Every structure is written in structure tokens, then in C-alpha cells.
Image (cartoon, rainbow, N blue to C red):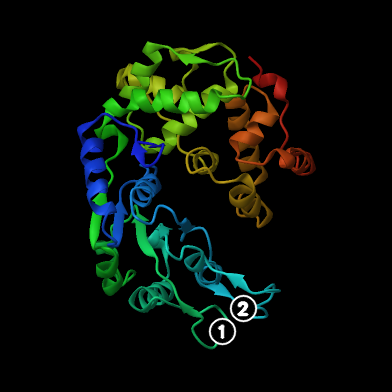
């Protein structure tokens, strides 16, 4: 599933057709929506489709990742702050809820909010009042539609005492579940060609197509990372590809191995390493090297060997091109020299020629 045009979702499966009809129905209302589903299925895209088909489409939809910030920064991000309210607050700041006035606020990973933040959000949803961090009174009211998303089971969290029941019922007016990609395999060819077109447009890559056999193998894969994983795989194939057409042999080994069947796998599977987990965060969750790997290394929570293993995996996929490694690790182009300097300084740079094919 992917956003296309004004809220159109790519996919020919019955599940996507049903979901699209449900979006059409609920978009006309102003009810709060809770979107659930596995990581990477496209919950934010559903939120965009709801907003774009609603009467609020002419105003902003503002997204906030509730898992990406500590509690104090998340409060400031949502509600804003006044000058001098904390160290570094050099000026008044408008919060995302105020930015979304008249439009939609999308709260991603709502299950990661602390109980205190849940209480603040509940109060806002009940009153519409905004009280900025450091302010002694409410700054006014805003009118926003709330769409929240999570890959966690909020009912289980309520039982565990980690999610407020009153907030759950306030959010769960309309509940949409986005099915995983493995349950709608007929959507995969369309998504493959959509991503291929997007990534090959005006970027000078030699890749311009994908063979039918390769598409069949991609359609047979289970996609534990769902649409996000598929998107990342296609981008990697485009970035690292050297031929005009992507063939089966160009696909990642894990995809080819699953297609061949269990009988062709090694008898003993390699134990998952720290580098494997970090690489998954970079390539599937689209997190940056500087926010995921660098702090862990500088705080000595991972070793030089872990970083070298991670770089090795990147070089294997990038066929020895460090600029492509930096892109795979979700860095800005201006960070390339900083990345190489870091690797040299900490003896993590590996000879690229060993990975050239």
C-alpha cells in the first residue's frame, strides 16, 4: 500500500479495497481514529489518506513520532514552550498541535507515550486547550482531528498498567487495522513497480526495470518488515544496481533463500548479532547512523567490533562504495566526510576493494 495522488492507496487486493472504502466513509466525519497494524504496514499512509479525503484536507496534517523523543521534548513538541522555560528555550516555540489547528494531528507510536504524557494528551482532547511548557495558563484552544497509530496491543498495555484506559476509549472511536503485506501478496507487484519508478526517476541509475522472475520471488517472500522493508529493498537494488534490469540473482540473499525453501538453507543458521539488529534499524526502520549507532558506541554500549561488522554489512550491500553505505545508513550527503573521519579515527574503516564486484 502506498499513497498516490490525493489519498489513493496502491493495491488491488480485497483487503485494500475494503480499507479504502472504510477510509472514504470515516473521512467525512470528524471522529478520532486509531490505526493499528504491524510495523511498516503503512499506518501513516492510511492517516494521510483519511486527512486528504476529509473536509480538513485544505489545512495541515502534522505528524509526531511519540517514540522518537524523551518525555520532556515530546511535551514541548506537542504543546510548544515559552522562552526561558528550560535550558535552550531561547524563544517561544509553537507546538505541533497549534500548527495543526483546523487540520489533523497524527500521533504515531502512541503506545510509547509515558503515563504522564498520556494524561496531558487526554486533558487536551477533552478541552482543546493548549498550555505551553513553562506557561502559567492556557494559551487558547485549537480544533484538530486526532489520528493515532500503534503496533502494540493497547488492551494488553491497559491490563499491565502502562496505558490509560480512559485515553484508549477516547482514541478508539473508529478502529482501523492495516493487514500485513504477507496477507495481501497480490499488492506486491504493484508496489514493486511503484517504488522502482520513484527511485529511478532522475537519479542517473542504470536500473530501469525488474524481471518477472524477480517480481515473483519478491511476491513469495514473507516481508516481516512489511511495506517499509519492501521499499528499502527496492531502493537498495536501485542504488547498488549496475545493470538495466534487476534479476533474481540481484535480490538480497534472505529473499532468495526463503524462495528456494528450507531444504536449501544451511543446516545451522548463524546466530543473530548486534550488527544484525543495528542494520535492521538502519535499513528497515530508516533510522540514522548518527542517532542509533553513534551514541551507543560513544557511550561504550557497543564495541568497535560491532561497528566494524555493521560497516562490513553495508559494504557488502553497497559493493564497496562508501558513499552508498552512507546513504544506506540514512545520512545526509553533507555527512559523508564526517562519517569517514569517524571510521578512520576509531579504526572502523574497512578496505572497500574487497567488496567490489
Alpha carbon separation for disc pair 1 and 2:
6 Å
**Residue 148 falls in image quadrant:** bottom left
- The residue under label 2 is 82
- Please indicate whether residue 185 sits to the left or right of residue 330 in the image: left
- What percent of the width, then of the height, locates residue 62? 47, 57
Look at 69% across and 72% down and name the residue there. Answer: 88
Check disc 2: other Cα within 10 Å, few if <14, some if 14-19, many if 20+. some
- The residue under label 1 is 135
- What percent of the width, then of the height, locates residue 138? 49, 83
Look at 40% across and 65% down and name the residue there. Answer: 144
Q: Nearer the viewer, residue 45 or 293?
A: 45
Tag of residue 18: none
Q: Does residue 96 appear in this view?
A: yes
Instruction: Report if the CB atoms under discs 1 and 2 are less than 8 Å apart.
Output: yes
- Point out the tag, 1 or 2, that comes first from the N-terminus: 2
Q: Quadrant of the N terminus?
A: top left
The count of marks equals 2
Amino acid at each position: 500500500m502506498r499513497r498516490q495522488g490525493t489519498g489513493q492507496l496502491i493495491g488491488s487486493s480485497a483487503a485494500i479495497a475494503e480499507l479504502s472504502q472504510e477510509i472514504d466513509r470515516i473521512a467525512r466525519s470528524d471522529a478520532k481514529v486509531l490505526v493499528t497494524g504491524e510495523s511498516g504496514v503503512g499506518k501513516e499512509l492510511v492517516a494521510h489518506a483519511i486527512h486528504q479525503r476529509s473536509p480538513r484536507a485544505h489545512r495541515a496534517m502534522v505528524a509526531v513520532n511519540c517514540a522518537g523523543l524523551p518525555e520532556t521534548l515530546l511535551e514541548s513538541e506537542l504543546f510548544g514552550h515559552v522562552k526561558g522555560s528550560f535550558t535552550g528555550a531561547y524563544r517561544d516555540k509553537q507546538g505541533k498541535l497549534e500548527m495543526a489547528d483546523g487540520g489533523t494531528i497524527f500521533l504515531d507510536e502512541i503506545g510509547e507515550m509515558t503515563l504522564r504524557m498520556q494524561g496531558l494528551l487526554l486533558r487536551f482532547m477533552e478541552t482543546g486547550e493548549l498550555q505551553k511548557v513553562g506557561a502559567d495558563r492556557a494559551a487558547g484552544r485549537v480544533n484538530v482531528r486526532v489520528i493515532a497509530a500503534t503496533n502494540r496491543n493497547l488492551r494488553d498495555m491497559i491490563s499491565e498498567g502502562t496505558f490509560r484506559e480512559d485515553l484508549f476509549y477516547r482514541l478508539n472511536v473508529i478502529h482501523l487495522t492495516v493487514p500485513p503485506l504477507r496477507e495481501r501478496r497480490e499488492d506486491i507487484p504493484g508496489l514493486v513497480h511503484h517504488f522502482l519508478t520513484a527511485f529511478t526517476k532522475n537519479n542517473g541509475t542504470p536500473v530501469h526495470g525488474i524481471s518477472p522472475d524477480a517480481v515473483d520471488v519478491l511476491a513469495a517472500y514473507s516481508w516481516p518488515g512489511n511495506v517499509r522493508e519492501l521499499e528499502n529493498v527496492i531502493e537498495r537494488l536501485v542504488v547498488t544496481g549496475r545493470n538495466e534490469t534487476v534479476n533474481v540473482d540481484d535480490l538480497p540473499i534472505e529473499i532468495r533463500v526463503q524462495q528456494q525453501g528450507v531444504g536449501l538453507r544451511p543446516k545451522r543458521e548463524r546466530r543473530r548479532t548486534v550488527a544484525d539488529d543495528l542494520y535492521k534499524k538502519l535499513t528497515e526502520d530508516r533510522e540514522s547512523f548518527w542517532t542509533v549507532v553513534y551514541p551507543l558506541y560513544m557511550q561504550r554500549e557497543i564495541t568497535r567490533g560491532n561497528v566494524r561488522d555493521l560497516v562490513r554489512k553495508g559494504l557488502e550491500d553497497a559493493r564497496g562504495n562508501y558513499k552508498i553505505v552512507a546513504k544506506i545508513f540514512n545520512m545526509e550527503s553533507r555527512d559523508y566526510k564526517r562519517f569517514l573521519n569517524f571510521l578512520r579515527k576509531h579504526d572502523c574503516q574497512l578496505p572497500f576493494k574487497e567488496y567490489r564486484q
